[in-house]
Amino acid sequence: MSTDTPSARVTNRAGDTGAARGARRSRSSRPAGASLGTRRRAPVYAGYLAAALVFFGPVLFMVWSAFRRNVDITGSIFNLTSPLTLDNFTNLFERFAFFYYIRNSFIIAGRSTLLGLLLGVPAAYVIVRRRLAAVGFMTLLARMAPGVMFVLPLFVLSVNIGAPSNNGLNFLLLIAAHLIITLPLCVWLLIPFFEDIPVTLEEAAMLDGCTVGQRFRNVVLPLALPGLSVAVTLSFIFSWNFFLFALALANSDTLPLPVIAFNFIGQGSSDYGGLMAASTLISMPAFLLTILAQRWLVRGLTGGAVK
Amino acid sequence: MATMTETRRRKHDRGAPPGRRRGVSRRDSTGATPVSRGVWPLMLPAIIVTGALVLMPVLYTGWLALSDRRPNGENAGFVGTSNFSQMFDDPLFWNSVRVTLFLLVVCLTVETLLGLALGYLLSIDVPGRRIFQGLMLIPAITASVAVALVWLLIYDPTLGAANQILDAVGIDPVVWLGDPDIAPWSIAIVDIWQWTPLMALIIAAGIRALPSEPFEAAGIDGASNWKKARHVALPLLMPVISVAVLLRTVDLVRFFDTVYIMTQGGPVNSTNTLNVYGYRSAFIDQEASYAAALQLSLLLLVVAIAGVFTWWRRRQIVEY
């Protein structure tokens, strides 16, 4: 009996598997079979690969070139085994005092982001709660206005107040100019987040005797934290990347990174390694912040169109 | 301290006549919003700053366009519409309108079509979709200076990557940025590269949010996959697509950094967009008043486009 049972069990199991296999086979012959899932994934991943080649290729090329010697950059791009070097980066810091321009960029982007947030958060909150759609539309218009519109008046202003020769004033003007980017962006990004906070929560707090300020601090702000992080991230990136205002308004002491990189083109046209190293450094904050805040960025960049 | 001022403000507002409060906002009379008191201190700073930073420059540009500011900074005063009549007689102005519209049409068309294809790809549920979707943001958030510099290297006529790849497949090298007939297309390629992924992300989100019932109904009626995509999915996606197109249109009209860094409007003004022309006439030709007229025409273009799209979107919403 005891010897019979295992063999019976084996045959039994074999029979079972056979039946199951048969059933699965008959199911997979139909179009919506379970095993088709993996087969349908293959073309999707092939598409991913193609898209990655096209859309990440130039960025990878930039980072790779930043670590190559100029001799190799001007050679074949198919020479994948060419030696890598840090010379392009050390050159930037030693010969062009790159730290100084990084500091300038941090001053301008950091402070304009902070100011944009300080002004934009209460404004966005009021626009949502009071349903001031017209004001919301105005901020959208401010966001859409072409930057070239602002450069000329700001330049005339800068000349009139003597900003070109005064570094402090020059920074102030650049921060104010970048506020044109960060403030409407903050308001515009925060509106959908504030809209998601249920009014009932605030009404409950109001019944408990909270003032407007307390409700805002203790109820609204904690709930809007993801929105705030999106606003900070994107404002900082947009301000950091912005090129036009500093191109026209900055003096040689207040130049931020994008303009100094642009000036490199004229100085050493054949130093592609240096240019790519500078480009890589400029793009670093954006890359880092994308990795950190990726989930919310999709929503933020598309203005709430994507949740 | 803050609490005290808040209480005082509330007391003050409670005493205010209801008519005055209604004057602040018509919605207030419903009393549905908990933030009905003390909102102006929250709003005013932003309004003042936005006004000072946005409205003042626009008004000043308007004044500049109607007057004659000399390169030495002196303003010869009101000259009426002479800057505008100069603009309408300027072949370079019409050229820049043409270039701007060319880039607008080419980039929008390609970005929408590619965005639909890529958006469909990104909407399919497979492991790793979220991560890939996040990585697709990289071209959009890379500094446009970095984008322009790397594409300058790619487009380099002798040692650039583009021509090396063409050479590897046996195609003659192309003068990407030096030929007036090709340069606008090369610039368009950069913009398409940078912004198609964002378009695709928006469309992918739209596809994922589609209800399944219309597709089941169409399936029962015997519609083919193509017909489902064309007659069910596309109309349902229209609102999402129009948002994406509006975002891109506005940014394309403002398109400046990449063009200015890569070509400065050349060769032979073939990439001289309204933006670049406006900047160049202000800061290189030193004709502030003429530049102001150019920039006002640009603003007009942006407002007109925004208006058309607002109207179009409202029509879409009524239909569905």
Image (cartoon, coloured by chain):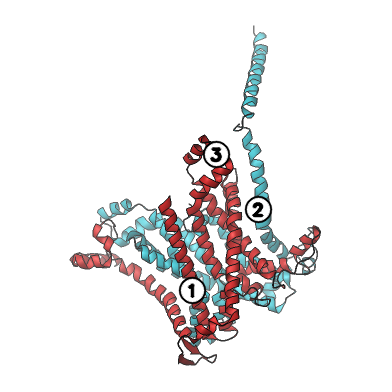
Chain colours: A cyan, B red
Q: For the residue carrying disc 2, how many other residues have a C-alpha within 10 Å: few (<14), some (14-19), or many (20+)?
A: some
Res. A237 image quadrant: bottom right
Is the residue at mark 2 from the same chain as the one at mark 3?
no
- Left/right placement of residue A81 relative to residue B15 reads right
The answer to whether residue A73 is visible is: yes
- Left/right placement of residue B173 relative to residue A238 reads right
Residue A123 percent across, percent down from the top left: 37, 65
Type of the residue with mark 1? Leu
Q: Which residue is mark 1?
A: B299
Question: Which of the two discs, 1 and 2, sits closer to the camera?
Answer: 1
Question: Which of the two discs, 3 and 1, sits closer to the camera?
Answer: 3
Q: Is residue A219 above or below residue B72?
A: above
In the rendered image, which quarter contains the N terminus of chain B? bottom left
Q: For the residue carrying disc 3, how many other residues have a C-alpha within 10 Å: few (<14), some (14-19), or many (20+)?
A: some
Chain at tag 1: B
Q: Which residue is mark 3?
A: B223
Is the residue at mark 3 from the same chain as the one at mark 1?
yes
SS at mark 3 in the image: loop
Chain at tag 3: B
Q: Earlier in the sequence, mark 3 or mark 1?
A: 3
- Left/right placement of residue B171 relative to residue A15 reads right
Q: Which residue is mark 2?
A: A51
Chain at tag 2: A
Res. B106 image quadrant: bottom right
Q: Is residue B209 above or below residue B14?
A: above
Q: CA–CA distance between discs 3 and 1?
A: 46 Å
Type of the residue with mark 3? Ala
Type of the residue with mark 2? Ala
Q: CA–CA distance between discs 2 and 3?
A: 30 Å
SS at mark 2 in the image: helix
